[in-house]
Image: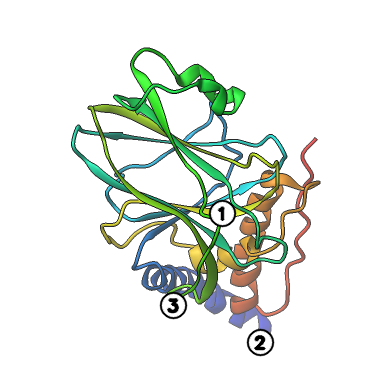
Amino acid sequence: MRNATRWPLRLLYTPVLILLLATISTSMASAHQPIFEEEDLSAERTLSIANPTISTALYATLDAEDDVDFFTFTAAEGTRVLIGMTIPQIAGQDEFAPTIALIGPGLPQKEKALLPPSAQSLINADNGFDLFLAPTQASAFFEPFSRTSYWRRQQTRVTMPADGTYTLIVWDAPAQMGRYVLVVGDREVPGGDPLFAIKLPNYWTPVDADAGASDASQLSTCTVLQELRHRILGGDLPCRPRRMP
């Protein structure tokens, strides 16, 4: 009877715990809005950035040699947007330096062969592009909100030359796989993924070429369930992510 009476009371803790985790995550992410790549991105499945002037940190993965990630946003002529990249200090990533391209109306017309094949169809009479290559020397820094360390790669500010939709693409020409954080915008507004704090440790692991981004997403969900069960009921919930065919 003792256990039977304690069970409902513990269930009442669930919404309180979820609110607590969300509060912690929001305070950790007060410098930017963190968003995770939950599904593998492509030209057909892009991640839309709601406001390119708000500081957004997009935690993503190149999980195959030919992987190219696509992000989109709309902007008015004259909008000035910060675009940058940091690389998590994960084992094996010290030389990981993906390329960023910005594609959109009014940008310079260049040889589209400089882009990956999956992005070349975006270039036309209206849309040009700029390339942002990683510097040869990267500086390291410690991020106090998430208490994690990174290498700085590209950072630039671009003034949008026309009204319209712009696409950011990320790929690695040497075909190295790894995790990166694409930073867009510099205006600090609280927000982003409320489960950032408990998803981050699972993200902070070397890329498994056999697992891919889909398993990374499932592991993040399992980590959430594991944390909730451990804090409410005690014990562990084993994570067994399903391999995608």
Circles 2 and 3, Cβ within 8 Å, touching? The answer is no
Q: Which image quarter: residue 44?
A: top right
Q: CA distance from mark 1 to mark 2?
A: 49 Å
How packed is label 2: few (under 14 Cα within 10 Å), some, or many (20 or more)?
Answer: few
Q: Amino acid at mark 1?
A: Tyr
Q: Residue at x 53, y 78 (%)?
A: 9
The numbered dot on residue 180 is: 1
Determine which residue is flagged by label 2: 2
Q: Do labels 1 and 2 touch, CB within 8 Å?
A: no
Residue 172 vs residue 50, the one in the foreground? 172
Q: Please give the name of the residue rendered at 29% of the width and 46% of the height, measured from the top-left corner.
A: 81
Residue at 51 percent across and 69 percent down: it is 197
Mark 3 or mark 1, which is nearer the start of the sequence?
3
Binning the other alpha carbons within 10 Å of mark 3 as few (below 14), some (14 to 19) or many (20 upward) gives few
Instruction: Indicate the secondary structure of the residue bearing disc 1.
Output: strand
Mark positioned earlier in the residue sequence (1 or 2)? 2
User: In what element is the residue under mark 2?
Assistant: helix
Tag of residue 144: 3
Q: Closer to us: mark 1 or mark 2?
A: 1
Pair 2/3: label in front: 3
Whether tag 1 and tag 3 are in contact, CB under 8 A, the answer is no
- N-terminal of the pair, mark 2 or mark 3, is 2
Residues 228 and 9: in front is 228
